[in-house]
Every structure is written in C-alpha cells, then in structure tokens.
Image (cartoon, rainbow, N blue to C red):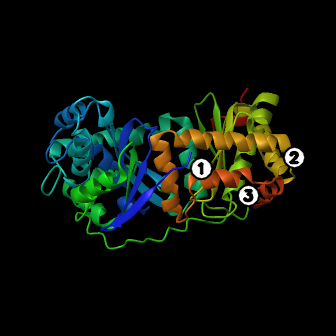
Amino acid sequence: MKAQVNQKTVDGMKFHLVPNKKHKTISFVAKFRAPLERATITKRALLPYVLKQGTASYPNRIELQKELDELYGATLAITGGKKGENHILTIRLDVANEKFIPDASSVMRRAAMLFEEVIFQLNGEDSFKDEIFEREKKTLLQKIHALKDDKMNYANTRLIDEMCNGEPYSLHVQGYEDDLISLKNEDLFAYAKSIIKEDVMDVFVTGDFQTKDMMDLMEELLSGKTEQLNEEVAPINSESTASNSPKEIVEEEAVQQAKLHIGYRTNILYEDPRYAALQVFNGLFGAFPSSKLFINVREKNSLAYYASSRLESHKGLMIVMSGIAPQDYKKARDIIREQVEEMKNGSFNDEELEETKQLIINQLLETMDHPQGLVELLYQQEVGGKSLPPEQLIKDIKSVTKQQVIEVAKEIEEDTIFLLTSKGGEKSE
C-alpha cells in the first residue's frame, strides 16, 4: 500500500493530507515539537490534562463531550511524549466519515472546527479555570507518584536516568513534582499560547476525502493563527556516545520478580542509511517471539518471564527489558551478552534473516492500515529530517543483507545495566 501524501506549508504549519479509501474515519492530528528542556517539560506534561477539560466555546468537560457525542461519537485524545531529544505534544480528533452516515453532510466541517477550537481557543483569558487547573495538577501528581508502582516502567525510567545523565533525553516525560507544585495557572496559560507561536507544528489528516476540499478547509480554519516564523527547522542531533565502560546500577526493593534492563548505544539514527539494517538486527535479536532473546533467555534457559528489545531510533538507543528471578541476574545478563556477540559473529542463517524481514514488513503494513500508525510512520520523517516513505522503508528492509546486519551489530555498545531486585538479590532463594 502506497501512502499518497499531499503537503503544503502555510504560516509555518506543515499540512500533510493522506487520502485513504480504506479508512472509514477522518483523523485530524496536530503535532507540536520542541526541544526537551527541564524548564518546560512539566508544563508540557500538564497541558494535555488541562486542554481536555474544555475550550472557549465548550468551557467544561461535559460541554466538550456533548459536542463530541453529537459528532457521532467522535473521540479526542491529547498526549505528550519523547522522540529523541524532542518533546511531542499530540492533539488527535477522530470522527466518523460523513460519507457513511445518512443526512450528515456537515460532520466533517464541524469536526474540523472543533479541532481548531481545541488547538487555538483556550478556555480562559489570562489563565485556565482555577478548579480545572488545580484538579488536573493533582491528577498529574498522582501519576508521578504512581510511576514506581509500575516496576517495568520504573526500571526503564531509572535506566535512562543513569544512561543519559546530563542529556535532555533523560528528562521525565511526566514532569517533576517540585516543578508541578510551584507551577502557576497563568504561567501554564502563557506557555500554552507560546507553543502555538514557537513549536514546530505539523497537521495530518487521514481518511476518505477530496484532497483539494480538505486542504481548503484546513487553510480556512487554521491559517493566520500560528505566527510561526521558522518554516524549516533542522532536526535535533540526538546521537551520543557510550560510557568508556558499562555502568551497573542495582536497586533493592521488596519485589518478587527482578527487572533487568540493559541500555545500548546503536550509533545509528533514523536518518542513517543503515537504519533498515538496524531494524532487521533488532528483529533477529529481540523484537519478536522468534528472536534470540526470547528463545535463548526465556525458552531454552527458563531465565526470564519476558525478554525483548526495542529501539529509540531518534536517539540511537536499544533497550533490552527482561523480568527474571532475583537469583538469576548474572546468568541472565551473561546470556543476553552472548546473544549480542552471536549477532556480531553472524550466528543466524538466511532463512531466519528472510523470516525476520517478512515479520518487520508485515508489522509495517499492519501499522499503515491504521490511521494512527500511518501518521506516526509519516511523522518519523519530520523528526528525523529525512524523506523515508513507508514503502521505501519496506524496499530497504527487503534488500538488507546478512553482512549489513553483522556490520550494524558491530556498532552496538553496551552502556548501562539497571537491575531492580529483591533485598539480598542473588543471595535470595
């Protein structure tokens, strides 16, 4: 499936219209991109909670939900996250396509107007409503406190704390308690207005529509409101180097299952010509149930409840995550290290290589079938500053050779081990 993308930049906003007859909904997505900074991360973490509670025309959650319900059950999601050393704020509105609803000719326009409202028409003059601001601060504070309850997420956060210490990528995407407590309503409101002017803004629309009509509608509703000056923004170079020798951090808690997370520097970013080979490496190494990690750490040696790896392609990281019995730490660590060496030595056959390539391609095709997945694939190109359409990535993956995978494997360097284990660790029985 080829994604036809029609692009146009207006007032610093880049529109990406992706007509697709397979999608029965229309998805409006705005993405705001800014460098990760301690001074703004907590504001950006809180904003989604506050923005979901109302706009100028729909001043509370009940009124906003009523409008969504009248749009045949449209859904609104506002989230924040990291891609490399960028913070991405995403506003997404999904609505049923009026083509499939009898006597519903104004649904798409009305949904687009609500999309504009959520982005530009803030609920207040100089500040948000105090009760909304204070309530959502408490909600976010609870999320920050709850981080430690999710041991896998906590271990991952602590690994990045240690591995990327001093780098913007180490900043916590949910923000910081001290900054949240001291944050003033009017400061958050002023910041919300500033991102419209200062962030890099991309707008995606996917679904079954006429491109010209949709582009006209987007320009009519969104142009002239951003005051953005920079139409072309260079991507942030997020690559960094590994420690001279791997760090090992051990924390003890009352846990039954230890979390062994290992961070590697891949030395390869999204825009690197070796990106496809890195994807194939990760597929063979740890991304699938057929990968070396799952088979050798979990199945053959019964050392892990789970074992997998994932890439952060805009930062040049690979993270291995495993859940193990506390007494099995050294065995599990050594077998994980053995799998990396096996990859560097080319210990995989042509059949495994081709099967893995097909798994990755199937995953990409499945992602493209969903509006949200398609937008994320297309947005990777904006963050990475490289044109790499999904269909080109599929071609690149098909052409990856065994030797290219071996060369990529040789680039990978172990950086940091983080172990969250029971008191007594390996001494536990």
In front here: 235 or 46?
Answer: 235
Position of residue 97 relative to residue 211, above or below, is above
Q: Which mark is residue 215?
A: none
Residue 68 in view:
yes
Left or right relative to 167: residue 212: left
Q: Which mark is residue 159?
A: 1
In front here: 85 or 180?
Answer: 85
Question: How many labels were placed on the picture?
Answer: 3
Name the element at disc 2.
Answer: loop
Reading the image, the residue beneath label 3 is 412
Left or right relative to 56: residue 357: right
Reading the image, the residue beneath label 2 is 347
Circle 3/circle 2 CB separation < 8 Å: no
Position of residue 112 relative to residue 323, above or below, is below
Residue at image x 83%, y 40%?
351
Amino acid type, callout 1: Leu
Q: Position of residue 422 (x, y in %)?
A: 63, 33
Amino acid type, callout 2: Ser
In front here: 154 or 232?
Answer: 232
Q: Name the mark nearer the viewer: 1 or 3.
A: 3
